Amino acid sequence: TSGDVSPLWGWAIARQLHSMWRALGEPPRFDVIEPGAGRGLLAASVWRYALALDERWAAALRYTLVDCAAPDAPLRLRREARLMAELAAIPAPSDAVRWATSLAEAASDGPITGCVVSNELVDALPVHRLEARGGRLAEVYVALASGTDSFIEEPGEPSSERVAAYLDNYHIPWREFPDGWRAEVCPAAEAWLREVAGVLGDGYALTLDYGASARRLYTRARQAGTLMAYTHHRLGAQPLAQPGRQDLTAHVNFSALARVGA
């Protein structure tokens, strides 16, 4: 699922987006908004596909990359320059892509006809960690170890009623699970999808990620949850180590996205 490995993944998503355009009746303007677009590898693949296989779709295509970095941030500027050079080599139109810092800015002209597409975004949204303790749920917080600058875990009461009731809302029998059983819950994913729905007039939301339905995600067998840390493509077991220097992910509850989407 990484555009770094092969163009095949981006080509497959481009084919899906093309099918969406046709299903919508081939509108004269088809917007693709990609939050968490990274270096724009998917955008380049979509433009290659459109220019090679359907010039009519290429004429309708408008592609916006959403990156929360400031427009003048060095990383953002390097990404833009690299992508523009790659698009010019295809060659794609000079206005093939534009950048925005939020979904609202990306749809500043009003609800779009098209698709909001994200690849491995939702698993990077912030989560709350819960732990079963004596028939109750505790929330696992992050704290500083006394007298040091090291992070440690610190259990406490759930931070909100919404977090405390999250597993019950999906009928997860966590009270039957052993003490120490852990799970991650992500209300932020629901808020994100509501934002996505707000920018869609006629079209689709397509999100690709690691996850499962709630009943398959929150099981007795998955006692430690799914929070993982990656650095230099290696899996790590200490999410609080090396803050800012490793990627943190947790599997997505697709039941939540389906419920909010509906």
Image (spheres, rainbow, N blue to C red):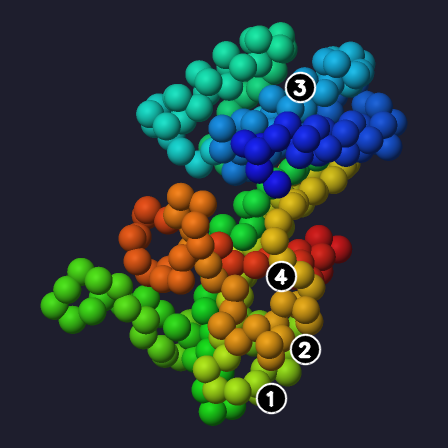
Alpha carbon of mark 4 to alpha carbon of mark 3: how far? 31 Å
Q: Are marks 1 and 3 in contact (CB under 8 Å)?
A: no
Question: Residue at 46% across / 78% down in the picture?
Answer: 131
Residue ID for mark 2 = 171
Q: Position of residue 226 (x, y in %)?
A: 52, 64
Alpha carbon of mark 4 to alpha carbon of mark 2: how far? 13 Å
Please report whichever mark, 4 or 2, sits nearer to the chain's N-terminal start: 2
Please report whichever mark, 3 or 2, sits nearer to the chain's N-terminal start: 3
Give the amino acid at mark 4. Asn
Q: Alpha-carbon neighbours of circle 4 within 10 Å: few (<14), some, or many (≥20)?
A: many
Q: Position of residue 246 (x, y in %)?
A: 37, 49
Please report whichever mark, 4 or 1, sits nearer to the chain's N-terminal start: 1
Alpha carbon of mark 1 to alpha carbon of mark 3: how far? 51 Å
Give the amino acid at mark 1. Glu
Look at discs 3 and 2 and give the one toward the viewer.
3
* Image mark for residue 89: none
Residue ID for mark 3 = 47
Please report whichever mark, 1 or 3, sits nearer to the chain's N-terminal start: 3
Alpha carbon of mark 1 to alpha carbon of mark 2: how far? 12 Å
* Image mark for residue 253: 4
* Image mark for residue 176: 1
* Callout 1 secondary element: helix
Give 98 or 143, whichever is nearer the viewer.
143
Give the amino acid at mark 2. His
Choose top left, top right, bottom left or bottom right for residue 63: top right
Quarter the C terminus occupies? bottom right
Question: Residue at 65% across / 45% down in the picture?
Answer: 207
